[in-house]
Image (cartoon, grey):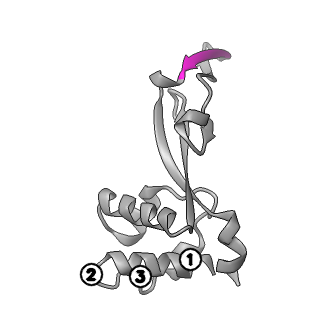
Amino acid sequence: MWFEKLLNIVGSLLPSNPTAGIEKELIRLNPDKVYTENVRSLLNISQKRAEKICEQAVRQGLFTRHIEVLCPDGSVATSAQTLQDLPKKVTCWHESNDDFDELEYNIEDLRKTYYYSLNNENAAILQS
């Protein structure tokens, strides 16, 4: 399964074996949207270490990296594989006086975050 490959990556990057007993939790992760915070919390490691694990998974072809743009309320406005693939502007909804207004924002003005997804090219191999 795909998580076995991730466990091998985690094991190779950490001196001890923190992967014992986490298989059930790892299976519950959405393979289409894995955040470094998921990995950090699951393994009880630093954010930097979680980022390193996810980036190693990208280099090994297990994950692909994506970037998402967040509206001021924290909802996702759009996402893409690279910053260059994002539109220049996005529309977000803003609630005021029990009504919703559409507001347009430049993506430079909004918070962005990375997430990872199982590389579809390797999914069949990893799940067999």
The residue that mark 2 highlights is 15
Q: Residue at x 72, y 75 (%)?
A: 124
Q: Nearer the viewer, mark 3 or mark 2?
A: 2
Considering depth in this image, is 116 or 56 the residue closer to the camera? 56
User: Could you give the CA–CA distance between mark 1 and mark 2, rounded to whole angstroms?
Assistant: 19 Å
Q: In which quarter of the image is residue 69?
A: top right
**Left or right of 23, for residue 49:** left
Q: What residue type is labelled 2?
A: Pro
Outermost residue, left side: 15
Tally the numbered discs. 3
Q: Distance between the residues labelled 1 and 3?
A: 11 Å
The reply to whether the C-beta atoms of the residues labelled 1 and 3 are less than 8 Å apart is no
Residue drawn at point x = 33 percent, y = 69 percent:
44
Under mark 1, the amino acid is Phe
- Residue 125 as seen in the image, left or right of residue 34: right
Q: Provide residue 59's location: percent of width, then percent of height.
A: 48, 64
The magenta stretch is: 100-106
Query: Residue 3 has which mark?
Result: 1
Residue under the point 31% across and 67% down: 45
Judging by the rendered image, the residue that carries numbered circle 3 is 19
The disc labelled 3 sits on which kind of residue? Answer: Thr
Which label's residue is closer to the chain start, 1 or 3? 1
- Image coords of residue 88 (percent x, y): 58, 22
